Image (tube, rainbow, N blue to C red):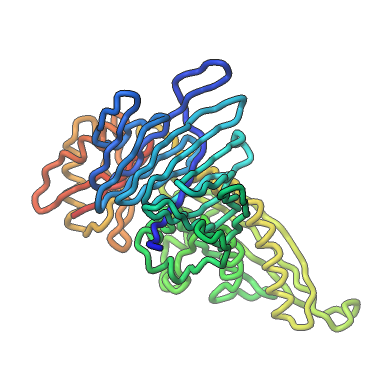
Amino acid sequence: MKKIVLVFIAAIALGSLCFSGVIEKSVVIGYLKGSVRVIRKPDSASLPAKLGMNVFPGDKIETSKDSRLELKFEDGSNFRIAENTSVIMEELKQEDGIDKILCRIGFGRVWVNIKKTLESNPLLFRIASLKSSATVKGTTFRADVDFDGESEWGVYDGIVAVSKGGNEDKVNKYEKLTSKDFLKTKLDEAEDSKDDWVRWNKNRDKIRIMIVFTEKKNGELSFVPLSEVIFAEELLNNYMYTVIDQAALNQLRNDEKIKAALTDDKDEKKAAAAGLELGADIIITGQVDATAKQTVASYGMYTGIADMSIRVVKCDTAELILSKNGQRRMADPIDQGAFNNAVRKVSRFLVDGANNDIINSWKRETIKGSTLFVSLYNADFKKIQSIAQSLANIPGVRNVNQISLVDRRALLSLTFSGDSLSLAEQTAELKISDVKLEVVGVSLSRLEVEVK
């Protein structure tokens, strides 16, 4: 069976019509690359897709070769469509307080990541192909659909209930199910890693987090804090995160920005600046004071006690998301084991408490004042300077500043008298010598631009 990967994310979006307890809704195109058509009902008008365009119930989306599209929902969920794909957004509504979404996939590749948060409205999200269907409530998954309608559903987080011909089975995290034989097996992540579409989606979903701690063990300052590694391991139990490489961080550990982020717990801007040095979306700074000692009462066992405090800061806006501390103790026959176990236990406690705040903050895309951010991909220093100067010439743009440049990924900030969609349209029309800009993403507070 020729594999075609599907993955989704979806949830709530504001609508227009309200009658008999039913609110019709729409979703917005937030990322667009290549040639995509939207076929409207009932007049079947075919329109070229544009950033910021609304997609309504009944609309059919068709992508061509080398095209990608992302639909953004109000709660931060996303529904991505790959090249050579046909999708009908058959149902987008809220009925009796429940958000109901039905997508019909003719063929192609899509990526679904449905956010599940405490404040979300109840959601019924269904996906149907010719020969099978799936119901999800909060998960990340892919489904491979061939032109004959046979599908393969692979789950990365949560649970997906797949049905075919009266049969139903629940596909759990890191499992997949093929509709042809209705057989469930383990998901082959090594195979997935070879697929550019899957890699792109995974990277796009993940929040890049930098973890930098100061650590004392039995009163002595640690040169390379082991607690950073333990905390990262606990954090990575959540699919949404990727952690900045520890080796890259160690090379910058003596950087003045990192020192400032660790020592000044009242200035979020210093923490944000340190995170941007390595292209992080979130920086978590921490202080750890741990001991592992034997006592007479412990019968030869070591007792580990770990005090940990963390600060979570959003790097592009310097917003303090969370400040939290905790203490845990554990016993072990050896001192290092007692130390590790105590640190792991308090890390787990703090990660569990921070997850909801981190993800909810990441999903909120509200404009703070008139500040907008421009992410530039594949940009060198010379091109960035030319782009910044051209942006400054757009009417209504002021205070263009470069915040970071890491691995040809740059972040600019500016103030603008209009909205992000208006800025996106004018950015796409800029004429810059030896530089071509393609605006591939837009949200309320950010543009994403590929530099060619």
Q: Give whichever of 139, 436 is nearer the camera.
A: 139
Percent position of residue 445, x then y: 37, 38
- At horizontal 45% and vertical 71% (from top left) the residue drawn is 190
138 in relation to 235, above or below: above
Instruction: Give the image location of residue 300, x and y in percent.
Output: 85, 83
Q: Residue furthest left?
A: 433
Residue 53 shown left or right of residue 365 in the figure: left
Viewer-proximal residue among 179 and 389: 179
Position of the N terminus, as image quadrant, is bottom left
Task: Place residue 427 in its image quadrant.
Answer: top left
Residue name at image x 63 percent, y 57 percent: 351
Q: x%, y% of residue 111?
A: 43, 51
Q: Nearer the viewer, residue 415 or 231?
A: 231
Give the side of residue 235 with respect to residue 403, left or right. Answer: right
User: Which residue lies at the image location 27% right of the left edge and 49% below the top edge?
Assistant: 67
Is 445 above or below relative to 214?
Answer: above
Q: Residue at x 50, y 54 (%)?
A: 141
